Every structure is written in structure tokens, then in C-alpha cells.
Amino acid sequence: MSASRVHGPDAPTPSRWNSPHVGAYGASHVSVGPWSLKFLWSLELGVWSFRAVALAVVFALAHPGLAADTWKAGVAKAVITPEKPVWLAGYGSKRAPEGKLHDLWMKALALEDAHGRRAVLVTSDFQGIPKAMCDRTCEKLRRRFGLARDQVMLTYSHNHCGPRLTEDLHDYYPVEAEQEALVDEYTALMEAKIVETVGAALAKLAPASLRIGEGRATFAVNRRNNKEAEMADLLSKGAPLKGPVDHAVPVMTVTASNGRLLAILFGYACHPTTLSFTQWCGDYPGFAQIALEKNHPGAAAMFINTCGGDQNPLPRRRVELCERYGQMLAEGVENALKQMDVGQTLLSGQESRRNGSARQECLAYKPVSPSLRTAFEFAALAYEKVVTREELQAELQHKHAIHARWAARMLKKLDAGEKFAASYPYPVHAWRLGGELLFIGMGGETVVDYALRFKKEFGPGTWVCGYADDLVAYIPSRRVWEEGGYEGGPHLYEYGRPAFRWAGDVEERIVECVRRLVKKIGRASSGEKQ
């Protein structure tokens, strides 16, 4: 029962004045005219109003979790465009910056449910966040704000026109002392910036409402099954493309109690690799966020990369294509917002004349009840085989510089007495928002099979997000692992791991972990009891 419902059980009515006694004096001692009746009636109402307020305050203090049956939300954002010449991340080469198309951003959404439970989601235009940076930042957030690891999710779009960070794809780049110092300096600034931005979002916590919906965008292509060089011809012929994709655009809005739109959180499964030049840019997610924030002044558009490890925007490599994909994604979000508005009208009972299928579709775009549960775990992902000293020494002579740099760094670790672990601590999150939204967050470059599997298993309202906390490596499904190739084959060295390949049970281990966490937060998979 909320405090607003606590009122005195026997509120006064005019009939009380028919009593033979009025106030402290008998009626026979006081002449009560019409004006006096009004005055005494107002006085009595004032006394009862005071009593009701006092009871409400006492109740709220005794039951703080029941004081307000609503979400609280806070949003903050910060520019993260480097001011010094940190190289651009990705593509395995030295890429010094040469200007910018637009700024890069970090954005934080803080949520608090009706019982005071909190969670913070950070989105960013980083190519990836390395484990050490994530761990340090989460520890700072714990000390500063009391946020446990399960309450914080740090995501990155995997944008390849964003900056390098320390230990992210470390062996991808030539080693230059001046550049290493710049990257270390920038990384430290970004750790502080995350803490600052999260703090700003928490400071803005205020009553809000959440709604979820889903749009669609179709530019993502399964790059394992469709050759980039053939895409223009395939599209011109209208030929069907091959391989699994996830063209859903999940959307969540955050609206203040005064009706002002605070944030639009949305996702898509696709690599932000339309561009490969040397200007700062958020790629297609950046252009989508710019378009949405232009359409909704004052709102923060926040992008998450769902499971796009094996998905590319094709064709690509031109700015006009990047802008077009961003606009397509923004239109998918806008279409969802329109349907959410219709769904809200239906829920409020203001429109009843719709056919059954349309009504059912619109009601899928619904508010999220103010209840939050979060869980987190490191799943141990086993390597197929830990690399040996002999194998590393042979790699020193490899024709590709990345192999040689990786081997030299691994040998230094062995020389220092380090023993390589047989598995990697893989971060997995599960957040339940009300009974309407299940948010699964996983580290690394998860392939699309994970999104398709978990959405089928856990049903409508399931969001599956890769690229969270730690850019571990490519995370193949069993199908992709068996097929091999870039995402499933022996390429873990690119991410600095002490092995070439994951063990074949990588998907099984992740699925078991996700199921444990989802069960822990109170939402069962199909076939399981709640």
C-alpha cells in the first residue's frame, strides 16, 4: 500500500455536526450561525488532514520500499572524443586520427525500482573495454556509490572509428612508446569519466516510467554466408541472402513524471564497421543517435550492440552508406515509438475499435512495472588447448606481425613465472525489469545464434546484448565453432589469450550460466517451473 493511499479511516462529514456536542463546548452554550459552521467545519477538516499526513509520513518511514510504486531514473552523458592523437581502434594497424565527423559519447542510465534496488547501464562509442579497465572501474563504482558488480553493465558499440584503450587488442598495433603513454593516459581519463557520468546519472534519479517495444532494420548481413564483393550484385538482382540474422530493434523509453522523454535505449545486431578511415565517428550507431536526439530534443539516445559478432553492414566503406544505415536504424526506433504510443492508448482504454490482431500487436508495446532484480557471474570458458612455449617460439617467426607481437608478449609472461590458466572468466549478466523485460548481457563478440536462441527460450521481452563489460574475443555458438572460420576458428591470439581456440563446449557453458542467472532473478525458461 503506497503512502498516497493512507488516509484517516473515518474522515469527517457534515453529519458529525448533528451531535449534541460541538468541539469543547456543548451546543447549548454556543450560538452557531452559518458562518460559524463553515469555520468550524474547515477547522475540523484541517485537523483530520494533518492527522492523515502524519500517518502517511509514519507509514512511509516504517515501510520505505512501499513509499512510491514507481521507477526512478537518471540520465547523464559525456563527450569522450580524444583531445590528443590516440590511434583509432581496430583493423590491426596504426591509424592516427585526422579530424572527426562528429563527437563520440558515453551515456549512463541509472534505474531504481519501487524497493530502492538500483542498476546502471553505460553505453559508449568505444571499440571495446578490456577486462582490467572494467574491473578497476567497477571497483571504483562499488567504493563510491555502493554498486555491486551485478548492478553495473558497461557496454561498448564496437565502433571501429573510436579510440584505443589500454590492453584492448593490445597486439594489434605496432609498439611505440609515445603512443602507449597516450593510450594509458586516455584510458585513465575514461575510467574517471565513467565514474563521473554514473554519479551524475544517480544524482538525477527522479520518478519516471519505462516502456518497451520493438522495431526493425534490415541492413545487417551475415558476413559468414555472403561475400562482401558479391553484395552489390546480389542486392541489384533481389537475390535472397543466406545465413541467420536478427533484424529486430529492441527499444525502451524512459519518461519523466512530467511527460518529458529522458532516454531512448535501443539495440541492433551488427558490426559498426561501415567506415575504416581515420576520422572520429560513431559509425552507423552514432548517426542513428544523432537523428533520434534531433527528433526528440532533450532525450539521450543510447545504443547497445546486441549479438552482431558475425553480422556486417553491407555494402560499406562510404560515409553516405553509414549515414543511410544510421537513418534506417533511427526509423526502426521511430516506428517502435509510434506503436508504443498506440499501445499506451489501448492500455488506457481510450481506443477500443481496433481489430484483434492489431490490438494484440500494439499491446506488446507495454509499460515496465517498477521491480528490478540483477544477477552476475563469471562463466569459466575453457580453451581447447593452452599454448606451449615451443608453439610461441615458432610464432615469433610468423609473417604476420600480430602473431609475432603476441608470441613475444606471452613468452615474457612465461619467463616471469606466470602459468597460463586453462579457462577464461567470461562475464554474464541477467537483469529482470518487472515481469516485462529480461535483459541478458554477455562479454565479447557474441554471434547472432545466442540472441536467436535466448529469445526463443525465454520468450517476448527478452533482450540479448553482447559487447558488455569485456571485449573477450569472438564467442562462437557450437554451430559456428564446428564451421570454423574467423569467428569460430583459431584466432584467440588476436585478443591476447594464451590459446588459439575455445573448447567446443563454449555455447553449452554460456547457456548453463545464463539459465542459472535467469532462474535466480525469478524468470523461468520454457519447460521450467518458476
Image: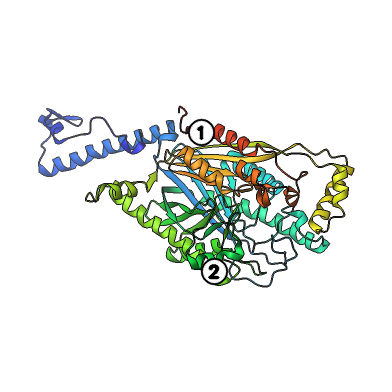
Earlier sequence position, callout 1 versus callout 2: 2
Report the front residue among 398 and 309. Answer: 398
Relative to 506, 26 lies left or right: left
Check residue 321 in the rendering and tell me which mark sits there, or answer none. Answer: 2
Task: Check disc 1 and give the amino acid type.
Answer: Ile
Q: Measuring 67% from the left and 43% from the top, which residue is drawn there? A: 139
Q: Identify the image quadrant of the N terminus.
A: top left
Q: CA distance from mark 1 to mark 2?
A: 41 Å
Dividing the picture into quadrants, the one containing residue 498 is top right
Mark 2 Cα shell of 10 Å, populated few (<14), some (14-19), many (≥20): some
Q: Position of residue 133 (x, y in %)?
A: 69, 49
What scheme was used to colour the molecule? Answer: rainbow
Q: Picture coordinates of residue 503 (x, y %)?
A: 70, 38
In this rendering, is residue 176 above or below 503?
below
Give the label on residue 521, or none.
Answer: 1
Q: Is residue 16 left or right of residue 131?
A: left
